Image (tube, rainbow, N blue to C red):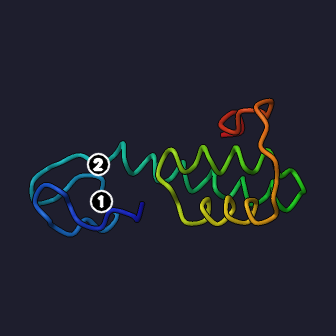
Amino acid sequence: MARMERCPACRARLADAEICTRCGTDFSTSRRAERQAQGLAHIAVRQLCLGQTMQAAATADAATHLASPLLALAVMETIRRRGAVHSTDVEDPRQEF
């Protein structure tokens, strides 16, 4: 999901505002999810660099559930191309956040 640039209610430009200046729609929750997803994506990259492939996959997956940042999608694609096996005993990556 790309960063929201226009208000879906009135189509006004949002810039970095959490509340639309035209119609007053509050986007603070979605902006917070975008920031958390980006943070998780950076953690996934760090885990991948450290060779923690399964943790990186879980962290990237958690990021995509929040907002699908491109960085998290790239980590998941890298892991997929390497042929890594997924496991259910991976720690919850949101614990680091």
Report crowding for label 2: few under 14, some 14 to 19, many 20 or more residues within 10 A (C-alpha): some
Q: Are marks 2 and 1 in contact (CB under 8 Å)?
A: yes
Q: Which residue is mark 1?
A: 17
The one of 24 and 36 positioned closer to us in this rendering: 36
Does 74 sit left or right of 18 as displayed?
Answer: right
Q: Position of residue 91 (x, y in %)?
A: 77, 33
Q: Earlier in the sequence, mark 2 or mark 1?
A: 1
What amino acid type is highlighted by mark number 1?
Answer: Ala
Q: Quadrant of residue 62?
A: top right
Image quadrant holding the N terminus, namely bottom left
Does 5 sit left or right of 24 as displayed?
Answer: right
Q: Position of residue 48 (x, y in %)?
A: 81, 58
Q: Position of residue 37 (x, y in %)?
A: 54, 51
- Helix, strand or loop at mark 2: loop
Q: Position of residue 53 (x, y in %)?
A: 83, 52
The one of 81 and 50 positioned closer to us in this rendering: 81
Q: Which residue is mark 2?
A: 27
What amino acid type is highlighted by mark number 2?
Answer: Phe
Residue drawn at the location 90% of the way across and 56% of the way down: 51
Between the residue at mark 2 and the residue at mark 1, the CA separation in whole angstroms equals 8 Å
Report crowding for label 1: few under 14, some 14 to 19, many 20 or more residues within 10 A (C-alpha): few
Furthest residue in direction right, as rendered: 51
Q: Quadrant of residue 74?
A: bottom right
Residue drawn at the location 61% of the way across and 53% of the way down: 39
- Helix, strand or loop at mark 1: loop
The one of 80 and 57 positioned closer to us in this rendering: 80
Residue drawn at the location 82% of the way across and 64% of the way down: 82
